[in-house]
């Protein structure tokens, strides 16, 4: 079952036109650790043509920009894997 924040993150990432998108709520693995201000921890695996020719840092920046309205209140941390379709082969 997905959380409301997970659904909002999935919706926000649609602007990157993913051909594959997997968002996992990992919050239960990080409950109570130092520095967590209450937002959730999520893993994102996203495949999009938008990432073609971009460095990993620029890909991550695009993901963070798409999720900006959820950071840092609803989301404390993101683990991101951002690929192009060609990188899946």
Image: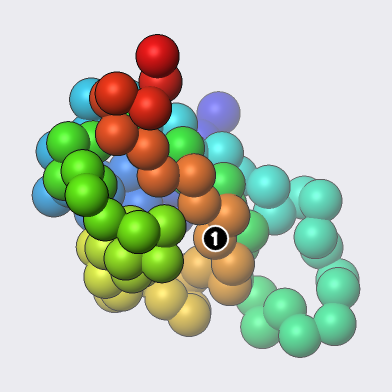
Q: Secondary structure at mark 1?
A: strand
Based on the displayed image, in which of its 4 quarters is residue 32 positioned?
bottom right
Q: Is residue 81 above or below residue 60?
A: above
Residue located farthest toward the right when viewing the structure as drawn: 33
Q: Is residue 76 above or below residue 24?
A: below
Based on the displayed image, in which of its 4 quarters is residue 82 positioned?
top left
Left or right: 52, with 24 as reference point: left
Decide which of 59, 26 is in the foreground and name it. Answer: 59
Residue 13 position in % (x across, y down): 26, 49
Decide which of 87, 3 is in the foreground and name it. Answer: 87
Q: Residue at x 38, y 27 (%)?
A: 87
Based on the displayed image, in which of its 4 quarters is residue 57 positioned?
bottom left
Residue 71 position in % (x across, y down): 42, 76
Other-residue count near label 1 (Cα within 10 Å), few / some / many at <14 / 14–19 / ≥20:
many
Q: Give the quadrant of the C terminus.
A: top left
The residue singled out by tag 1 in the image is 78
Decide which of 76, 58 is in the foreground and name it. Answer: 58
Residue located farthest toward the top when viewing the structure as drawn: 89
Decide which of 57, 38 is in the foreground and name it. Answer: 57
Residue 34 position in % (x across, y down): 85, 82
Q: How is the image coloured?
A: rainbow
Q: Residue at x 50, y 51 (%)?
A: 80
Left or right: 24, with 35 as reference point: left
Q: Residue at x 55, y 28 (%)?
A: 1
The number of numbered discs placed on residues in the rendered structure image is 1
Q: Is residue 67 visible?
A: no
Q: Is residue 67 above or below residue 17?
A: below
């Amino acid at each position: 079952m997905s959380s409301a924040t997970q659904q909002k993150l999935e919706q926000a990432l649609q602007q990157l036109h993913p051909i594959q998108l997997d968002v996992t709520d990992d919050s239960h693995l990080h409950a109570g650790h130092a520095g967590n201000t209450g937002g959730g921890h999520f893993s994102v695996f996203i495949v999009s043509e938008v990432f073609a020719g971009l460095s990993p840092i620029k890909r991550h920046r695009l993901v963070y920009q798409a999720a900006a309205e959820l950071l840092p209140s609803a989301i404390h941390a993101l683990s991101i894997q951002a690929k192009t379709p060609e990188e899946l082969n």
